[in-house]
Structures are given as structure tokens and as C-alpha cells.
Image (spheres, rainbow, N blue to C red):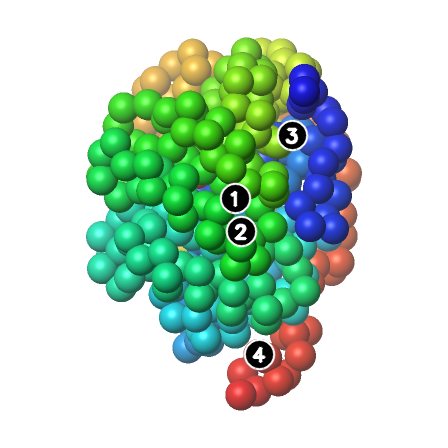
Amino acid sequence: MNIQLRDHWSIGGVEIPSRLVLAPMAGVSVQAFRRQGRRYGAGLVCSEMVSVAGIQHRNERTLGYLRVGADEHPLAIQIFGSDPVAMAEAARMVEAAGADIVDMNFGCPVKKVTKTGAGASLLDDPGLACRITEAVATATPLPVSVKMRRGVENGSRTCLSVGPRLVGAGAASLTLHPRSAKQMYTGTADHSLTGELVSLVDVPVIASGDVTSRAKAQSVLATTGASAVMVGRAAQGNPWALAEIMGDGHEPTREEVVAELLLFMRETIRELGEHRATGFLKKFYGWYLGHGRFPRPFKQELVMLRTLDEVETRLLAAAPGAREVLERLEAELPDPESEVLLDSLPISIYGGG
Ligand SMILES: Cc1cc2nc3c(=O)[nH]c(=O)nc-3n(C[C@H](O)[C@H](O)[C@H](O)COP(=O)(O)O)c2cc1C
């Protein structure tokens, strides 16, 4: 079947308007990133991985990750943990927060996560991975999806044995990033495994890894039979990569680049507060202003500035026309009051016991 990027599809009962999914990325996938992703063509966006332990302890910062904007749907919130009961409780929180899909992280290769039995280490404990999936799928009526790596060790094919079992336990969709956990981000994503996984399960499979262009997206869809492609690093500070993949590509003007960066900054300040946003945003300057769009010293200059007000002033001085573009973008955003906020969660779930 020849899948077009603009074709609709669904996970469980959730309708998804394009075959392009924005990847969950810790330290990147804030609300501003997800909303921007939707505007540039992503049919589904996902939060970064949220700690189930943090949810259990009602950690304020963790609960902040459960903020859902009206223009983000369909949205998956990704949770990670290794205890089926805690995962099930977290899934109910995710549902109450207004997400459309509960995604589970069975792929994180980072030691801090794997040493707790969560993330990619679950691929080495398929029994527990299935118990978690079953507990979560039973706890919520939302579709439950799993994102995983090919396995822990290099050359592993574990995903092909674990994947169908997870579907049997209730997963409504699987995302495969076909690198091993050991590989981290080195080497290449081997999408021949994605094709094999597609042939083994009767739920949608999303292909993640090294999709950076329309040509690559089309070839991964065609050769694997996956239902959608997921894009991560290529979209960092570069929503125009998503537009290119969707067939709407153009090289942005400096004014567009600065306007999108300023909008991203303003929204992130609103989400994280000025103090956290100041450090968080620094990596985005290079991502937005790179690609030959601005000279390198300009980025370094921004990183050195003390306040975000100063960064904004400097950016507008470099591209004064951005102000008008930014005003237009802001006028199109929905009212922030339309967000599902945590204090509107049912008391029995939020803090209530
Ligand atoms: C900075 C960063 C953070 C990430 N955080 C997560 C995460 O929280 N959850 C997850 O499932 N994958 C995470 N990933 C993996 C991505 O979702 C994706 O599978 C991977 O980057 C391969 O896709 P790409 O080549 O399009 O970047 C992360 C990747 C990066 C680069």
C-alpha cells in the first residue's frame, strides 16, 4: 500500500490527521515545541518522558509536564517507570490531564533510568513489560502505546519477540527506534527491523530514527509498511523540516526564524517560568539560528546575554520585521485559559489519595 503523508489514520479510536509524528524528547518537547510541531504538519505530538515516581510523589515540576493545551490534540503523554501499579495510577493522571494517548517508554538508554528497571531495560524483562502494559491498558480507556528500541545489546532483535507480546497485553500501537540501547544515537536506525515488526503485529507501527527529509520519510513508509514516521532531532529549532516532509517546504526568511524563536521563548517562559526558561532556551538559539541562517558569533552573543529581555531585544534588532510576523503568530494562538490545568484535575487523583 502506498501511504501518503497527508493520509489520516488512527490509534485505537484516536484520529490522527497526518503520518508525521513529533518525537518525545526530554529537555526539548515542551508545550511550545509540540504546538509548533502541530502548526507545521505533525499529526500527533508527544510529551517528553514523565517520571511515574515524580507523579506518585506529586512533584510539582513533574506535574507541570501534564499541562495540555487546547491546540495540541491529538497528544500522547509518555510515562516511564517499572512498577505496574504506579504506572496504572500515572495513566489515570495522564487521562485526567486531557491526553488522548498514554505512551510508555520502553526505550530510554540512559543509566539513571535503566538502573531503576525502567526504559530500555524492560526489553530484557518481557514478563514485566507485559504486566505493565496490561495494568496500564486496564487502568484507562485511552489507547496505550509503547515506544521501544530494537533491544539492549548491539544487533539485538528483541523488539521482534517483545513487540507482539506487548500487543497481546493491550498495546494499541508500537513505535520502534531501531537502534540498540547500547548504541545510544551512534550508527544508523535499521528500519529493516521496523518492516519485520510491521509484518508481525496487527496494530499501527511508527518508525522512529534518522527521518530528516521528505525523501527519507517516503522511503521509510514505503519500505517498512509503517503507519507513520516520527521525527525528532531534525525538528529541533527547525519546524521547517516538518513542513518540508509534508511537502510544504521553503527556506524560512530571517524574520520568520526570529519570530518563531521569539514565540517559542515567550511560550516557554510562560510554561517554565523565567528562571528555568533562561537556561533551557540556550540550546535552542543555535538550533534556530544555525543552518546558515545567521552568522555563528550571533548565536554566541545571545548565549552570553544575562536576561531573556536582552535576548529578545537583540533578536529584534537583527530582524526588525520579525515583530510583525510574531504579532500575527500570537494572534492565531488559542486563549491560554483554554488549557487543561492541573488544579482542575479531580481531587481524588490530584493529591487526594
Ligand atoms: C535530546 C533527546 C531526548 C529524547 N528523549 C526521549 C524521551 O523522553 N522519550 C523517548 O521515547 N525518546 C526520546 N528520545 C528519542 C527520540 O524520541 C527518537 O526516537 C530518536 O531521537 C530517534 O529519532 P531522530 O533520529 O528523528 O532524532 C530522545 C532523543 C533526543 C535526541
Circle 2 — which element? Answer: helix
Label 2 crowd (10 A; few <14 / some 14-19 / many >=20): many
What's the CA distance linking mark 4 and mark 3? 34 Å
N-term mark: 3 or 2: 3
Asked if 334 appears above or below 23 in the picture, the reply is below
What's the CA distance linking mark 3 and mark 2? 21 Å
Q: Which residue is mark 3?
A: 19
Name the front one of labels 1 and 4: 1
What's the CA distance linking mark 3 and mark 1? 14 Å
Q: Quadrant of the N terminus?
A: top right
Q: Position of residue 50 (x, y in %)?
A: 45, 59
Q: Which residue is mark 4?
A: 350
State left or right for residue 335 relative to residue 37.
right
Quarter of the figure with residue 244: top right
Name the front one of labels 4 and 3: 3
Label 1 crowd (10 A; few <14 / some 14-19 / many >=20): many
Instruction: Using the image as rendered, state which of residue 311 and residue 56 is in the foreground.
Output: 56
Q: Which residue is mark 1?
A: 174
Name the front one of labels 3 and 2: 2
What's the CA distance linking mark 2 and mark 4? 30 Å
N-term mark: 4 or 3: 3
Q: Which residue is mark 2?
A: 167
Residue drawn 74% across the image and 60% down it: 337
State left or right for residue 81 relative to residue 35.
left
State left or right for residue 34 relative to residue 180.
right
What's the CA distance linking mark 1 and mark 4? 29 Å
Q: Does the residue at mark 1 contact the one at mark 2 (Cβ under 8 Å)? A: yes
Which residue type carries mark 3?
Arg
Q: Is mark 4 within 8 Å of ligand 1?
A: no
Circle 1 — which element? Answer: strand
N-term mark: 2 or 4: 2
